[in-house]
Image: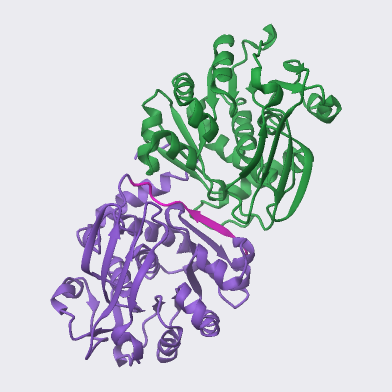
Chain colours: A green, B purple
Amino acid sequence: MGIVVVGSLAFDNIKTPFGEVKNALGGSALYFSTAASFFNSVSIVAVVGSDFNFDEIKFLEDKNVNLKNISVKAGDTFRWKGYYDFNLNEAHTLETHLNVFADFKPELTEDILDEDYLFLANIDPELQLSVIQQMKNPGFIAADTMNYWIDNKKDKVAEVFTKVDAVTINEAEIRQFTGEFNLKVAAKKILDLGVEYVIIKRGEYGVLMIDKYQRVFFTPAYLLETIFDPTGAGDTFAGGMIGYLSTRENIENDLRKSIVYGSVMASYDVENFSIKRLKELSASDIEKRYNHFISYCELGIKNV
Amino acid sequence: MGIVVVGSLAFDNIKTPFGEVKNALGGSALYFSTAASFFNSVSIVAVVGSDFNFDEIKFLEDKNVNLKNISVKAGDTFRWKGYYDFNLNEAHTLETHLNVFADFKPELTEDILDEDYLFLANIDPELQLSVIQQMKNPGFIAADTMNYWIDNKKDKVAEVFTKVDAVTINEAEIRQFTGEFNLKVAAKKILDLGVEYVIIKRGEYGVLMIDKYQRVFFTPAYLLETIFDPTGAGDTFAGGMIGYLSTRENIENDLRKSIVYGSVMASYDVENFSIKRLKELSASDIEKRYNHFISYCELGIKNV
């Protein structure tokens, strides 16, 4: 069974201490599906404007990504302009233009309605709810969000959370959503909405997962000498995580390994702008870094 | 073989979002030795003023801590006044009074000169060098420092680092000392001084260790619902780490476990002001949290 992702396709203008790109291909659905495509088939639900050139994402089709649920509307594709300083954990937004996303109402094609895995990337929560309603009965749904929607549609974000198995959320955003600084207490508030797994993204400090039994799992971030651009790391993480998970039989047993795979993919994402580094990866690159990654937490020494 | 620590005994005035204490017993040597005393015998090298009441540290003697190298000088004991806001990772110093520490010249008693483990807590690097010179041939030396000494005596801090096996240092301080934001690159610069293990303390984000072979080990921080006061967490960490390590035969094999024991002790420290929580611990409390702690990084699920 494959994966459905609803999220954005975008053009990004990004400046980091290490370089700058303009009109780079971006968006949560792009990062997610590129990462997930190494593990399973993915269908993207999104909208683009008439300025979008499908040749740019032709490589996704070659990697078993279904592009049929990408609508093309008159107008411009979603655009984001932002920058990072040396604290790469924090994106500074300069401009956000929703453009064709402003009044997007997705209508999913029949063939993807019974897919088993659904990722609701950071996007208007009403749009996330509409996709949940259309899907038949996905076995695993994860949702992300961001400060913009918590500020403007907090009730709808909470409604999404009552309908999903996992929430992936930034450290600052879970504090904002719950009004709790302490992450253990904040996670409990999300779990109380019926979520089974709260997955807190902490940028260069890794990922913290707390499940409904209050069990904790922790993954550091892979230690890189050069981080070029953190844009898309969270969605790439989710793509690697859900991609791997969707190939396994038991979510509870395999979620921890999936989180490590997600972290591996995110670590590759940040090594270059846009999806440049992700595109050139091989399965053995992923396995190699996975093995290196797990050695970070082993009590015995391992040379990898 | 036992442990020698040179560091401060102090009176602290501390305010956190959760409470306030005045004239609380503190200082790096106090936190270190309290934590290490659960594992091995410790000798404290320090100086106090005539205002210091030894009854307050009588409990240390009962726990096999040698107090004979604590000098008493005319004047006042070292005092620190500071506060924390909700970001408990960052201490804000309001006042530092070195007092009797200002011209302390330690002279170690003969009986501790051949101890095998030495911890140079955050203190004037010239004083750290003097203790290294007096000791006969310790098998393992670790040193800490802080921004104050990096600002004022950076050359001496570097000289200390050339003479030690391990450096324990805060994330912000290793960036300051090396002028490198990237931690992997920064760690290399410290390793190049001849250090074998660079142990970077990241507060609520845990501990990152990089060894001379560029092998990485990572420990998260224990997830607590209430953190009362982070003062002393770094020294308590070092005390637990070196305490456990000093009971083992092979440093390379057991340093990783030692770092987890250090993290366990630090997690208890922050649950109350001063050493209140540490004083009441039992060996089984430590083992229980150690086991819980290692479950945080296990790929399989474990109920603890």
**Quarter residue A194 falls in:** top left
**What is the magenta segment's predominant secondary structure?**
loop
Query: Does the magenta-highlighted stretch encompass residue B220?
Result: yes
Residue A239 appears left or right of B111: right
Residue A98 appears left or right of A129: right
**Quarter residue B56 falls in:** bottom left
Estimate the x, y position of residue A38 in percent, counting from the top left: 71, 32
Residue B244 appears left or right of B191: left
Question: In percent of the image, x 60 and y 71: which residue is there?
Answer: B178
- Residue A146 shows up from this direction: no
Question: In percent of the image, x 56 and y 46: which residue is there?
Answer: A203
Compared to residue A76, the image places residue B273 above or below, namely: below
Estimate the x, y position of residue A54 in percent, counting from the top left: 83, 25
Compared to residue B85, the image places residue B108 above or below, namely: below
Instruction: Decide which of A100, B166 is in the foreground and name it.
Output: A100
Which residue is outermost to the right? A55
Question: In percent of the image, x 21 and y 61: which residue is there?
Answer: B276
Residue B253 appears left or right of A270: left
Instruction: Decide which of B140, A151 is in the foreground and name it.
Output: A151
Which corner quadrant holds the N terminus of chain A?
top right
Instruction: Decide which of B135, A156 is in the foreground and name it.
Output: A156
- Marker count (numbered): 0
Question: In percent of the image, x 59 and y 15: which residue is there?
Answer: A131
> Where does the magenta region start and end?
B214-224
